Image (spheres, helix red, strand yellow):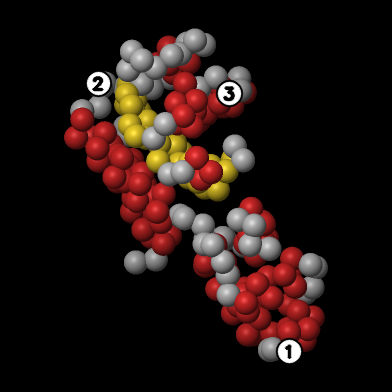
Amino acid sequence: MSVKLGIDVELHRLSMLAAAGYFVGLHIRFTAPLFTYQTYDQTWIDHYTENGYVLRDPMTAWGFSTTGTIRWSDPSLPDPFGLFTEAKRYGLAYGATIACGPIRSRTIASCARADREYSDPEIAAIAVIVNRLHVMTEPPEELTKAQLEALKCIAGGDRFAAAAVKLGISESALKARITSVRIRLMARTTAEAIQRAKDYRLI
């Protein structure tokens, strides 16, 4: 099974447990996740974004301060800005958040429903899915020498033909190297692969 298909399968499983939607931020580094998936209603997403709620979200603070699982209704969870009350107006009445991974590459995910609290077995199932997604999307620690040479040429502004000449290989061989880089970095385009390589400090 390819990584992309594996991610799709796990996200489908997550959607089955999140009737009111979910948010998954995978490998958050320097405050930005490498991958983001969410299925909350767009009106809530827009409202959340327009009001800068990420800076007030209790789950953001909790997720960076600890790992494990927690219900949104947990009495030990401070919500000074009343974000949970606001979320209920958009159908996100009950929820659970999972945080895993080291602080330098933290994954935080939340699932919501409108009808009832999550049971312990459901939260455990969500945690298994989120941990699988975290492992699946673990950034590579290195690329091969051939992959790096090809990517650096393209990142430096060379066109495929010029890069191939520079490296002494055929253009089709260069394209094959770039394709392998995109697969390795789970990037849809070469530009995205270059940006991810920079984010991962590979180039």
Q: Which quarter of the figure has residue 197?
A: bottom right
Sequence-wise, the earlier of marks 3 and 2 is 3
Kindly identify which residue carries mark 2.
116
User: What label sits on residue 55 in the rendered view?
Assistant: 3
Task: Classify the position of the N terminus by image quarter.
Answer: bottom left
Which kind of residue does numbered mark 2 sit on?
Arg
Which residue is at 50% across, 22% downward? 57
Determine the residue positioned at 37% across, 30% down: 97
Horizontal side, residue 177 vs residue 82: left or right: right
What percent of the width, then of the height, locates residue 122? Answer: 23, 34
Residue depth check, mark 3 versus mark 2: number of the one nearer the observer: 3
Mark closer to the chain start, 1 or 3: 3
Considering only order in the chain, which callout, 2 or 1, is on the residue closer to the N terminus?
2
Name the residue located 25 percent from the left edge and 21 percent from the top edge. Answer: 116
Q: Secondary structure at mark 2?
A: loop
Res 109 label: none
Apparent side of residue 33 relative to residue 161 in the rendered image (left or right): left
Image vertical order of residue 47 relative to residue 129, above or below? above
- Three-letter code for the amino acid on which mark 3 is drawn: Leu
Residue 22 vertical placement versus 134 (above, below): above
Identify whether 108 is placed above or below 183: above
The image position of residue 154, as x and y in percent, is 73, 70
Secondary element at image label 1: loop
Are the residues at dot 1 and dot 3 in contact (C-beta closer than 8 Å)? no
The mark total stands at 3
| In the displayed structure image, the side of residue 30 where residue 108 appears, left or right | left
**Label annotation for residue 168:** 1
